[in-house]
Amino acid sequence: MGARDLSKWQTGRRTKNAFGHTPEYNYDLTAFQVGTDLYRKVRADGSHEQAGLSLSAATLDAGVNHYTRRAAGEDTLRAYGLGAYWTHFGPSGWYPDGVVQVNRFDIKARPNELGNLNTRGCAPDLFQSVGGV
């Protein structure tokens, strides 16, 4: 994927300098998610269940130019995730499902005028929903 100009898609207030310039942003994003069912069971009443695991990974490399069009810095984000899911489908199409996922983040900001900023984090997620067809 190539670099993209995000300055057109910012939300909120955009301040311009005397020449009408705003900061410019570009990024390269690569991500994927895969999963597979490890358990499936079809019941006599027409309902069925399935459960499985998922893996995900993403990288984001970004840059920003100042109002003056000089490079202001770069950012890097790496994210990795592991998840598990379970869904029960009722005979008429209704379903409850749940997901448990843990994500790890490694983030580096490299501003041109300051020292580098590094952080790491972990985000556990728990999600449950109910729906129907």
Image: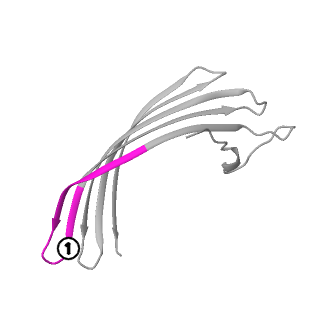
Q: Residue at x 59, y 37 (%)?
A: 27
| Magenta stretch: helix, strand or loop mostly | strand
Q: Residue at x 69, y 27 (%)?
A: 71
Residue to which mark 1 is pinned: 47
Task: Check the image and tell me how it is coloured.
Answer: one colour
The percent coordinates of residue 93 (x first, y second) are: 29, 76
- What is the three-letter code of the residue carrying label 1? Ser
Compared across the picture, whether 44 is left or right of 77 comes to left
Quadrant location of the N terminus in the rendered image? top right
Range of the magenta residues?
Answer: 32-51
Q: Residue at x 34, y 74 (%)?
A: 132
The percent coordinates of residue 49 (x first, y second) are: 20, 65
The percent coordinates of residue 122 (x first, y second) are: 38, 38
The percent coordinates of residue 107 (x first, y second) are: 48, 31
Q: Quadrant of residue 20?
A: top right
Q: Residue at x 68, y 51 (%)?
A: 12
Q: Nearer the viewer, residue 128 or 75?
A: 75
